[in-house]
Amino acid sequence: MTVLLETQSVSKNFGALRATREVSFKLEEGARHALIGPNGAGKTTFINLLTGVLPPNSGKVLLKDRDITQMAQAERVKLGIARTFQINRLFRGLSVLENVYMAVAERVGAAPKMLTPAGAQRDVIDESMQLLESLKLADIAHHTIVGLPYGRQRLVELAITLGLKPEVLLLDEPAAGVPSAESHIILDAIDALPKTIGVLIIDHDMDLVFRFAKRITVLVRGAIFAEGTPKEIGANPDVRAVYLGQATQHG
Ligand SMILES: Nc1ncnc2c1ncn2[C@@H]1O[C@H](COP(=O)(O)OP(=O)(O)O)[C@@H](O)[C@H]1O
Ligand SMILES: [Mg+2]
């Protein structure tokens, strides 16, 4: 198996707080991997180390054996590491299609403006519409972001991220705020991705995690607590004690 993204003993401190503790982790080609753990376990911090939002205090981050520990976020995106955008990355006054168009246009180096018909490229529009169809957003392609329910906005963010055609896809709670009846749309869209893409997902919804993941890593207080198949993790009494029982209690 080819390892796409790897960390070797990465640590991150915020003052006295050890948010990431010597985490050695591998995301393989075609991975459908979930990262779970209690609130404050360091899941988002770990994603920030992978994407270059934060530099680690020690340890290495490798992309296909290349040391990218010091590489800036934008460079990593160009090499194929994409994550879900924060909500405020959406252009709220523009339509759903225009938002996705700009992401696809940037990737292919086309003119970013589609506000005039002459400025828009047919192939970029077609690809954008295909993305919207895969996320069941085609019927609202011409609606502006500002009027959309939050769940729809999260799906638009996912469409934009997929528009970057990533090799590694990092999803930090993509279903947060999406009505549970619609969370399957996210999973269906990920299922439809090329099988070689490595996907790492963080989510609190254990139904979603156990349906999606072929492999699960449990993070507790910044360190890897357990790792294995969903079956192994589900049956692990220590994991149940620290996390799964607690997650059930809180819904
Ligand atoms: N930029 C930051 N500065 C200081 N502390 C932070 C920062 N980001 C996260 N933390 C702290 O690091 C710990 C891990 O946070 P986080 O990675 O967001 O956890 P999770 O995503 O698992 O809920 C928490 O105690 C959080 O308060
Ligand atoms: Mg988080």
Image: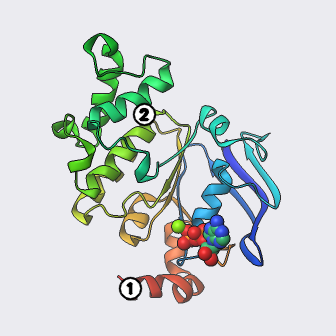
Mark 1: which secondary structure? loop
User: Could you say which is closer to the camera, residue 34 or residue 74?
Assistant: 74
Q: Amino acid at mark 2?
A: Gly
User: Could you say which is closer to the camera, residue 14 or residue 79?
Assistant: 14
Point 33% across, 44% down: residue: 156
Q: Is residue 68 visible?
A: yes
Residue 203 location in percent, x, y? 45, 65
Residue 83 left/right relative to 17? left
Residue 196 left/right relative to 93? right
Residue 214 location in percent, x, y? 50, 58
127 relative to 31, above or below: above
* Quadrant in the rendering for residue 142: top left
Point 78% across, 47% down: residue: 69
Residue 68 left/right relative to 229? right
Q: Which residue is mark 2?
A: 163
User: Could you say which is closer to the camera, residue 177 or residue 235?
Assistant: 177
Mark 2: which secondary structure? helix
**CA–CA distance between discs 2 and 1?**
35 Å
16 relative to 33, above or below: below
**Label 1 neighbour load within 10 Å: few <14, some 14-19, many 20+:** few
Quadrant in which the C terminus is drawn: bottom left
Total count of labels: 2
Q: Residue 250, which numbered label?
A: 1
Point 32% across, 44% down: residue: 92
Spot the residue most to the front. Answer: 93
Q: Amino acid at mark 1?
A: His
Residue 85 location in percent, x, y? 46, 48
- Ligand 1: image quarter: bottom right
Marks 2/1 in contact by CB < 8 Å: the verdict is no
Spot the residue most to the right. Answer: 58
